[in-house]
Amino acid sequence: MTFKVINGKKMADDLVEEVRLEVQQMCEAGHAAPGLAVVLVGDDPASGVYVRNKIRRAEQAGIRSIEKRMSADCNQEELDAVVEALNQDDDVHGILVQLPLPKHLSEERIIRLISPQKDVDGFHPVNVGLLGTGQADLVPCTPLGCLEMLQRELGDLSGKHAVIVGRSNIVGKPMANLLLQANCTITVVHSRTPNASEISRMADIVVAAVGVPKLVGDAWIKPGAVVIDVGINAIELDGKRKLVGDVDYDKVAPMCQAITPVPGGVGPMTIACLMKNTLVAAKRLMNISH
Ligand code: NAD
Protein backbone atom coordinates (compact mmCIF):
# COMPACT_ATOMS: atom_id res chain seq x y z
CA MET A 1 0.00 0.00 0.00
CA THR A 2 1.31 3.48 -0.78
CA PHE A 3 1.11 5.70 2.27
CA LYS A 4 1.21 9.42 2.80
CA VAL A 5 3.67 10.97 5.25
CA ILE A 6 1.81 13.81 6.96
CA ASN A 7 4.13 16.81 6.86
CA GLY A 8 3.74 18.40 10.31
CA LYS A 9 6.35 21.05 9.57
CA LYS A 10 4.47 22.27 6.47
CA MET A 11 1.10 22.22 8.28
CA ALA A 12 2.67 24.14 11.18
CA ASP A 13 4.12 26.74 8.77
CA ASP A 14 0.63 27.15 7.23
CA LEU A 15 -1.02 27.52 10.64
CA VAL A 16 1.54 30.07 11.85
CA GLU A 17 1.02 32.04 8.65
CA GLU A 18 -2.77 32.03 9.27
CA VAL A 19 -2.12 33.35 12.79
CA ARG A 20 0.29 36.00 11.45
CA LEU A 21 -2.32 37.31 9.02
CA GLU A 22 -4.92 37.60 11.79
CA VAL A 23 -2.41 39.36 14.07
CA GLN A 24 -1.63 41.76 11.23
CA GLN A 25 -5.35 42.53 10.81
CA MET A 26 -5.68 43.13 14.55
CA CYS A 27 -2.76 45.54 14.54
CA GLU A 28 -4.06 47.35 11.44
CA ALA A 29 -7.37 47.81 13.29
CA GLY A 30 -5.46 49.60 16.07
CA HIS A 31 -5.15 46.78 18.60
CA ALA A 32 -1.95 45.72 20.34
CA ALA A 33 -0.19 42.58 19.11
CA PRO A 34 -0.83 39.52 21.31
CA GLY A 35 1.76 39.02 24.07
CA LEU A 36 2.98 35.58 25.17
CA ALA A 37 4.94 35.21 28.42
CA VAL A 38 7.16 32.14 28.70
CA VAL A 39 8.51 31.28 32.14
CA LEU A 40 11.55 29.00 32.28
CA VAL A 41 12.81 27.77 35.65
CA GLY A 42 16.33 26.33 35.75
CA ASP A 43 18.62 25.31 32.93
CA ASP A 44 17.32 21.95 31.69
CA PRO A 45 18.70 21.77 28.12
CA ALA A 46 15.56 20.16 26.58
CA SER A 47 13.29 22.81 28.17
CA GLY A 48 15.68 25.51 26.91
CA VAL A 49 15.33 24.20 23.33
CA TYR A 50 11.51 24.08 23.60
CA VAL A 51 11.39 27.65 24.91
CA ARG A 52 13.71 28.94 22.14
CA ASN A 53 11.52 27.24 19.50
CA LYS A 54 8.37 28.77 20.97
CA ILE A 55 9.89 32.25 21.02
CA ARG A 56 11.13 31.90 17.43
CA ARG A 57 7.66 30.82 16.27
CA ALA A 58 6.06 33.71 18.18
CA GLU A 59 8.29 36.15 16.29
CA GLN A 60 7.20 34.60 12.97
CA ALA A 61 3.53 34.98 13.95
CA GLY A 62 3.95 38.64 14.98
CA ILE A 63 3.33 37.76 18.63
CA ARG A 64 5.38 39.65 21.25
CA SER A 65 7.17 37.25 23.56
CA ILE A 66 8.16 38.05 27.13
CA GLU A 67 10.74 35.66 28.53
CA LYS A 68 11.07 35.22 32.30
CA ARG A 69 14.04 33.14 33.40
CA MET A 70 14.31 31.99 36.99
CA SER A 71 17.09 30.07 38.70
CA ALA A 72 16.60 26.37 39.46
CA ASP A 73 16.70 27.09 43.21
CA CYS A 74 13.99 29.76 43.23
CA ASN A 75 11.27 29.04 45.76
CA GLN A 76 7.52 28.55 45.28
CA GLU A 77 6.67 32.07 46.54
CA GLU A 78 9.04 33.66 44.00
CA LEU A 79 7.55 31.67 41.13
CA ASP A 80 4.00 32.37 42.32
CA ALA A 81 4.80 36.11 42.40
CA VAL A 82 6.04 36.06 38.78
CA VAL A 83 2.87 34.28 37.59
CA GLU A 84 0.61 36.59 39.60
CA ALA A 85 2.33 39.67 38.11
CA LEU A 86 1.82 38.24 34.60
CA ASN A 87 -1.85 37.58 35.41
CA GLN A 88 -2.21 41.31 36.24
CA ASP A 89 -0.25 42.58 33.23
CA ASP A 90 -2.64 43.80 30.49
CA ASP A 91 0.10 43.48 27.85
CA VAL A 92 0.32 39.73 28.48
CA HIS A 93 -2.43 37.59 26.92
CA GLY A 94 -0.91 34.14 27.21
CA ILE A 95 1.19 32.61 30.02
CA LEU A 96 3.17 29.42 29.63
CA VAL A 97 5.27 27.96 32.42
CA GLN A 98 7.60 25.42 30.83
CA LEU A 99 7.22 21.99 32.43
CA PRO A 100 8.66 19.97 34.07
CA LEU A 101 9.52 22.22 37.01
CA PRO A 102 12.33 21.36 39.46
CA LYS A 103 11.06 18.79 42.00
CA HIS A 104 10.71 21.24 44.92
CA LEU A 105 8.14 23.35 43.01
CA SER A 106 4.47 22.37 42.61
CA GLU A 107 3.30 22.09 39.00
CA GLU A 108 -0.28 21.60 40.13
CA ARG A 109 -0.21 24.85 42.11
CA ILE A 110 1.24 26.81 39.19
CA ILE A 111 -1.29 25.36 36.72
CA ARG A 112 -4.10 26.51 39.04
CA LEU A 113 -2.51 29.93 39.60
CA ILE A 114 -2.36 30.96 35.93
CA SER A 115 -5.48 32.92 34.99
CA PRO A 116 -7.75 30.55 33.00
CA GLN A 117 -8.16 33.32 30.39
CA LYS A 118 -4.38 33.42 29.82
CA ASP A 119 -3.87 29.65 30.12
CA VAL A 120 -2.57 28.99 26.59
CA ASP A 121 -1.49 25.46 27.58
CA GLY A 122 -5.13 24.65 28.45
CA PHE A 123 -4.13 22.80 31.65
CA HIS A 124 -6.16 24.86 34.19
CA PRO A 125 -9.06 22.85 35.70
CA VAL A 126 -11.51 25.49 34.41
CA ASN A 127 -10.34 24.94 30.83
CA VAL A 128 -10.26 21.16 31.34
CA GLY A 129 -13.90 21.36 32.48
CA LEU A 130 -14.88 23.57 29.54
CA LEU A 131 -13.28 21.07 27.16
CA GLY A 132 -15.29 18.27 28.77
CA THR A 133 -18.51 20.17 28.08
CA GLY A 134 -17.54 21.21 24.56
CA GLN A 135 -17.16 24.91 25.37
CA ALA A 136 -13.38 25.37 25.51
CA ASP A 137 -11.43 28.09 23.72
CA LEU A 138 -8.07 27.10 25.17
CA VAL A 139 -7.26 23.44 24.58
CA PRO A 140 -3.90 21.68 25.25
CA CYS A 141 -1.63 22.34 22.27
CA THR A 142 -0.49 18.78 21.46
CA PRO A 143 -3.95 17.19 21.07
CA LEU A 144 -5.16 20.36 19.32
CA GLY A 145 -2.29 19.96 16.85
CA CYS A 146 -3.22 16.29 16.31
CA LEU A 147 -6.85 17.25 15.63
CA GLU A 148 -5.78 19.96 13.15
CA MET A 149 -3.58 17.42 11.33
CA LEU A 150 -6.38 14.86 11.13
CA GLN A 151 -8.90 17.43 9.89
CA ARG A 152 -6.49 18.93 7.37
CA GLU A 153 -5.70 15.37 6.15
CA LEU A 154 -9.15 13.71 6.27
CA GLY A 155 -11.67 16.59 6.36
CA ASP A 156 -14.80 15.57 8.28
CA LEU A 157 -14.00 12.98 10.97
CA SER A 158 -17.65 12.08 11.72
CA GLY A 159 -18.26 8.39 12.33
CA LYS A 160 -14.58 7.38 12.38
CA HIS A 161 -13.47 5.01 15.13
CA ALA A 162 -10.47 6.56 16.89
CA VAL A 163 -8.32 4.68 19.38
CA ILE A 164 -6.12 6.76 21.66
CA VAL A 165 -3.22 4.90 23.23
CA GLY A 166 -2.43 6.63 26.57
CA ARG A 167 -4.62 8.53 29.04
CA SER A 168 -2.41 11.39 30.26
CA ASN A 169 -3.96 14.72 31.25
CA ILE A 170 -1.91 16.62 28.67
CA VAL A 171 -2.44 14.37 25.63
CA GLY A 172 -4.64 11.24 25.90
CA LYS A 173 -7.66 12.58 27.80
CA PRO A 174 -8.01 15.93 25.96
CA MET A 175 -7.44 14.08 22.65
CA ALA A 176 -10.38 11.81 23.45
CA ASN A 177 -12.60 14.81 24.23
CA LEU A 178 -11.61 16.65 21.03
CA LEU A 179 -12.23 13.62 18.81
CA LEU A 180 -15.55 12.99 20.53
CA GLN A 181 -16.57 16.57 19.70
CA ALA A 182 -15.49 15.91 16.12
CA ASN A 183 -18.10 13.08 16.12
CA CYS A 184 -15.67 10.17 16.26
CA THR A 185 -16.36 7.00 18.21
CA ILE A 186 -13.66 6.88 20.87
CA THR A 187 -11.78 4.15 22.68
CA VAL A 188 -8.94 4.96 25.07
CA VAL A 189 -6.49 2.16 25.84
CA HIS A 190 -3.77 2.40 28.49
CA SER A 191 -1.23 0.49 30.54
CA ARG A 192 -3.93 -1.58 32.28
CA THR A 193 -5.83 -2.51 29.09
CA PRO A 194 -5.24 -6.27 28.59
CA ASN A 195 -5.89 -6.42 24.83
CA ALA A 196 -4.80 -2.93 23.69
CA SER A 197 -3.36 -4.06 20.35
CA GLU A 198 -6.55 -5.95 19.39
CA ILE A 199 -8.69 -2.89 20.17
CA SER A 200 -6.31 -0.59 18.34
CA ARG A 201 -6.49 -2.88 15.28
CA MET A 202 -10.19 -1.99 14.90
CA ALA A 203 -9.49 1.75 14.56
CA ASP A 204 -9.71 4.05 11.55
CA ILE A 205 -7.52 6.53 13.44
CA VAL A 206 -4.82 5.64 15.99
CA VAL A 207 -3.23 8.34 18.16
CA ALA A 208 -0.24 6.99 20.10
CA ALA A 209 0.77 9.00 23.20
CA VAL A 210 2.57 6.53 25.41
CA GLY A 211 6.24 7.41 25.86
CA VAL A 212 7.41 3.85 25.02
CA PRO A 213 9.66 3.71 21.93
CA LYS A 214 8.08 1.82 19.00
CA LEU A 215 5.39 0.18 21.19
CA VAL A 216 2.71 0.39 18.49
CA GLY A 217 3.72 -2.19 15.89
CA ASP A 218 1.99 -3.73 12.90
CA ALA A 219 -0.25 -5.91 15.11
CA TRP A 220 -1.90 -2.70 16.40
CA ILE A 221 -2.91 -1.27 13.01
CA LYS A 222 -5.75 -2.01 10.59
CA PRO A 223 -4.60 -1.70 6.95
CA GLY A 224 -5.60 1.75 5.67
CA ALA A 225 -5.70 3.42 9.11
CA VAL A 226 -4.40 6.94 9.77
CA VAL A 227 -1.73 7.02 12.49
CA ILE A 228 -0.67 10.02 14.57
CA ASP A 229 2.50 9.45 16.58
CA VAL A 230 2.82 11.84 19.54
CA GLY A 231 5.78 10.08 21.16
CA ILE A 232 9.21 11.68 21.32
CA ASN A 233 11.73 9.21 22.72
CA ALA A 234 15.52 9.56 22.62
CA ILE A 235 17.22 6.19 22.08
CA GLU A 236 20.78 5.02 21.40
CA LEU A 237 21.16 3.40 17.98
CA ASP A 238 24.56 2.29 16.67
CA GLY A 239 26.18 4.49 19.32
CA LYS A 240 24.23 7.56 18.18
CA ARG A 241 21.34 9.38 19.87
CA LYS A 242 18.17 9.19 17.78
CA LEU A 243 14.59 10.42 18.25
CA VAL A 244 11.86 7.83 17.68
CA GLY A 245 8.12 7.84 18.24
CA ASP A 246 5.77 5.47 20.04
CA VAL A 247 5.00 3.84 16.67
CA ASP A 248 7.31 1.35 14.96
CA TYR A 249 7.37 3.53 11.84
CA ASP A 250 9.16 1.16 9.44
CA LYS A 251 6.70 -1.68 10.10
CA VAL A 252 3.53 0.41 10.43
CA ALA A 253 3.90 3.04 7.69
CA PRO A 254 3.48 0.64 4.72
CA MET A 255 0.09 -0.47 6.16
CA CYS A 256 -1.31 3.04 6.60
CA GLN A 257 -3.28 5.51 4.55
CA ALA A 258 -1.26 8.25 6.25
CA ILE A 259 1.15 8.59 9.17
CA THR A 260 3.06 11.33 10.99
CA PRO A 261 6.86 11.03 11.21
CA VAL A 262 9.02 11.64 14.30
CA PRO A 263 10.52 14.20 14.21
CA GLY A 264 8.62 16.54 11.88
CA GLY A 265 5.05 15.48 12.73
CA VAL A 266 3.19 16.39 15.91
CA GLY A 267 6.06 18.40 17.45
CA PRO A 268 5.95 21.42 15.08
CA MET A 269 2.13 21.45 15.19
CA THR A 270 2.18 21.62 19.00
CA ILE A 271 4.14 24.88 18.88
CA ALA A 272 1.99 26.28 16.06
CA CYS A 273 -1.12 25.59 18.17
CA LEU A 274 0.44 27.55 21.03
CA MET A 275 0.47 30.54 18.67
CA LYS A 276 -3.15 29.87 17.75
CA ASN A 277 -4.12 29.69 21.45
CA THR A 278 -2.26 32.94 22.18
CA LEU A 279 -4.22 34.67 19.40
CA VAL A 280 -7.52 33.25 20.73
CA ALA A 281 -6.69 34.39 24.30
CA ALA A 282 -5.64 37.87 23.12
CA LYS A 283 -8.80 38.35 21.06
CA ARG A 284 -10.99 37.34 23.96
CA LEU A 285 -9.16 39.59 26.43
CA MET A 286 -9.42 42.52 23.98
CA ASN A 287 -13.09 41.75 23.21
CA ILE A 288 -12.41 41.11 19.53
CA SER A 289 -14.83 38.57 18.08
CA HIS A 290 -13.41 35.43 16.52
P1 NAD B 1 2.54 10.02 30.17
O1 NAD B 1 3.70 9.21 30.68
O2 NAD B 1 1.96 11.07 31.04
O3 NAD B 1 1.36 9.01 29.80
C1 NAD B 1 1.61 7.83 29.09
C2 NAD B 1 0.33 7.05 28.96
O4 NAD B 1 0.62 5.85 28.24
C3 NAD B 1 -0.27 6.62 30.30
O5 NAD B 1 -1.63 7.01 30.32
C4 NAD B 1 -0.15 5.10 30.31
O6 NAD B 1 -1.32 4.47 30.85
C5 NAD B 1 -0.04 4.76 28.85
N1 NAD B 1 0.76 3.55 28.64
C6 NAD B 1 1.98 3.26 29.15
N2 NAD B 1 2.37 2.03 28.74
C7 NAD B 1 1.39 1.58 27.94
C8 NAD B 1 1.21 0.34 27.22
N3 NAD B 1 2.15 -0.61 27.25
N4 NAD B 1 0.09 0.20 26.51
C9 NAD B 1 -0.86 1.16 26.47
N5 NAD B 1 -0.75 2.34 27.13
C10 NAD B 1 0.37 2.52 27.87
O7 NAD B 1 3.00 10.57 28.75
P2 NAD B 1 2.51 11.84 27.89
O8 NAD B 1 2.87 13.09 28.58
O9 NAD B 1 1.10 11.64 27.43
O10 NAD B 1 3.49 11.70 26.63
C11 NAD B 1 3.44 10.56 25.79
C12 NAD B 1 4.53 10.70 24.74
O11 NAD B 1 4.28 11.84 23.96
C13 NAD B 1 5.95 10.89 25.29
O12 NAD B 1 6.87 10.26 24.42
C14 NAD B 1 6.14 12.40 25.24
O13 NAD B 1 7.51 12.75 25.12
C15 NAD B 1 5.38 12.72 23.98
N6 NAD B 1 4.88 14.08 23.90
C16 NAD B 1 5.09 14.75 22.75
C17 NAD B 1 4.60 16.05 22.58
C18 NAD B 1 4.81 16.76 21.29
O14 NAD B 1 4.74 17.97 21.22
N7 NAD B 1 5.06 16.03 20.20
C19 NAD B 1 3.90 16.66 23.62
C20 NAD B 1 3.64 15.93 24.79
C21 NAD B 1 4.13 14.64 24.91
Image: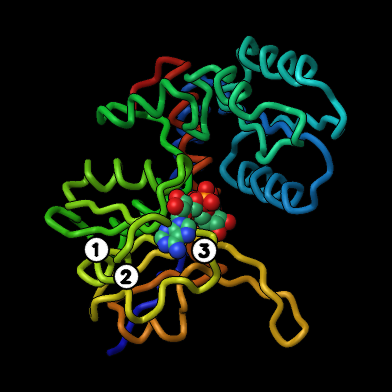
- Residue 51 at x, y percent in the picture: 70, 44
Instruction: Looking at the image, tell me whether mark 3 or mark 1 is earlier in sequence order.
Output: 3
Q: Residue at x 24, y 81 (%)?
A: 223
Q: Is residue 14 visible?
A: no
Residue 7 to residue 114: above or below: below
- Judging by the rendered image, the residue that carries numbered circle 2 is 197
Along the viewing direction, whichever of 12 and 288 lies nearer the viewer? 12
Please identify, in this view, whether the residue under mark 2 or under mark 1 is nearer the observer: 2
Q: Amino acid at mark 2?
A: Ser
Q: How is the image coloured?
A: rainbow
Label 3, label 1: how many angstroms apart (C-alpha)? Answer: 17 Å
- Residue 172 at x, y percent in the picture: 40, 48
Label 2, label 1: how many angstroms apart (C-alpha)? Answer: 23 Å
Residue 39 to residue 126: above or below: below
Q: Which mark is residue 9?
A: 3
User: Would you say the beta carbon of the disc 3 residue lies within 8 angstroms of ligand 1?
Assistant: no
Q: Amino acid at mark 3?
A: Lys
Q: Amino acid at mark 1?
A: Leu
Q: Is residue 163 visible?
A: yes
Label 3, label 2: how many angstroms apart (C-alpha)? Answer: 29 Å
